[in-house]
Amino acid sequence: MGSLRFRIIFYLLLFGLVSNLILSGVFVSSQYDRTLNSRVNSLTSYGQMLANSVASTGYLNDPTGSEAQLINTQISLIADIYDGRVVVVDRNCKIIEDSYNFEEGKTIIADRVIRGLRGESSTQVNETTHSAEIVIPVTGAAGSSEVYAVLIMSFNVEDIFTLSETTQNQSRLLVTIFALVMIIAAILISRHLTRPFRKIQSSIKSLADGYLQENVNTNGYTELIEVQEAINTMLRRLKVQEESRQQFVSDVSHELKTPITSIKVLSDSLLAQEDAPAEMYREFLMDISQEIDRESQIISDLLTLVRADRNTEELKIADTNINELIEQNLRRVRPIAEQRHIDLVYESFRDVRAQVDETKLSLAITSLIENAIKYNQDDGWVHVSLNADHQYFYLKVEDNGVGIPEEEQEHIFERFYRVDKARSRETGGTGLGLSITRSVIMMHKGNLKVYSRPGEGSTFTMRIPLYYRKSGGGRDE
């Protein structure tokens, strides 16, 4: 009942059969009415001609005269042609002529005769006896209202009823044949119309089985092509996510294994030297400690990234003074900047309050500022500015550091991606900072843009709504 194919068949049959039944019923009924009205009008015309002849001759005064005989012949002829009976009744309700020759000279008192003598014409069709009766008053000269006699014409219309029944039976047969044709056509049409849907269903089943390499291709209707494009877009994203997941697993394995390998090499070197000097022990142990710290940092960043990737319901949204939040973060990173004589400048254009998760947003802000310091040159500068409009606040972090090549900029938010791997090792980076930053910003329904030129520095612009919305999502621009 709920399938599209069943509904197509049902509606085709419903509209096809109902319209066919209505049209056939109207056709049969209108044909019967037209035929019957044509017969009645024809008889009425002949009756009016007879009434005029009766009125213009001396028929009523001398029914046996030559003119009366001519009229009687016309009456008999009409009665024979139309298989009926014609009766002439004078004003005294006496029958002066009967085409059946049954009741001549008798008196007839009937309602239709009385009305006819009053000048009323009438036509009655009896569908039970399949007969029609026409009553025509016989008046004097044109415009005269005096009635001299009444002409009663009774005819059998069985042939019209028979023709109507025959037509109706034929119509029923045609409707039955049409219904069978419609059923077959509806089944074929429904199969043809639902074929693209079956292709999509088959493709989706293949996707569910893990065959992400195949695209959906229906070659169907415009609407289905749009659905196909949406599915293929989703499929491309799934492929990218799957490749990213595999790459992420590989990168995590590599990043976690590297410090352990270094620790293993250092410890084995110490164990291989039985009389190693204390200075060597101290140096190697310091290297081992650094590798352990690095391993700990990687694990910490991974846990932070996992938490950032979880449902946004974990955000602890509160009304926050963004100016104070940025100043707190600047105080934490200022010693790092001072070590390299980097001028750290903060500029606020207005007081900004927004609904954010203070802890997570602080993590993103710190990451952007630390990157601007780490990948800068000695005696350089970092400019942090805050502005807002009626809907968003904007945090811009600018530096005059090494910059990012244009072809690398679309990859810098990928996990474990490093533009300069050697420099990242020196600064202690894990390649997860910008990934975590972007995830936090997207959790707040914001976005993050970057503009950079090698040797001139980089500019990161964060845009976040002032009022947190649970529905919807942000995207990178």
Image (cartoon, grey):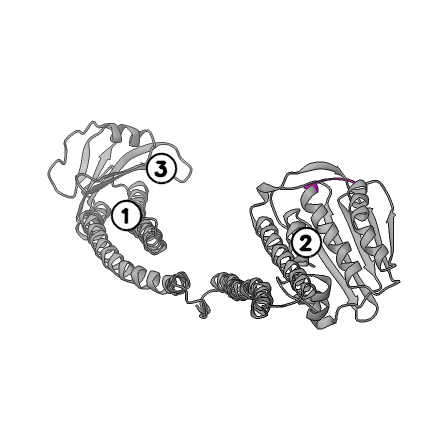
Query: Looking at the picture, does residue 120 appear above or below residue 178?
Result: above
Judging from the image, what secondary structure is the residue with disc 1 in? helix
Choose top left, top right, bottom left or bottom right for residue 140.
Answer: top left
Q: Give the magenta range.
A: 353-358
Tally of marks? 3
Question: In the rendered image, which quarter contains the C terminus?
Answer: bottom right
> Do the residues bearing badges 3 and 2 touch, measured as CB atoms within 8 Å?
no
Query: Looking at the picture, does residue 439 appear above or below residue 234?
Result: above
Mark 3 or mark 2: whose residue is earlier in sequence: 3
- Name the residue that disc number 2 marks: 437
Residue at 84 percent across and 57 percent down: it is 339
Task: Inspect this view and state whether residue 264 appears.
Answer: yes
Residue 2: image tag: none
Amino acid carrying label 3: it is Gly
Mark 3 or mark 1: whose residue is earlier in sequence: 1
Question: In this orientation, which residue lies closer to the viewer: 218 or 362?
Answer: 362
> Do the residues bearing badges 3 and 1 touch, measured as CB atoms within 8 Å?
no
Mark 1 or mark 2: whose residue is earlier in sequence: 1
- Name the residue that disc number 3 marks: 140
What is the distance, in whole Å, between disc 1 and disc 2 at their CAs? Answer: 90 Å
- Name the residue that disc number 1 marks: 36
Amino acid carrying label 2: it is Thr
Question: In this orientation, which residue lies closer to the viewer: 13 or 343?
Answer: 343
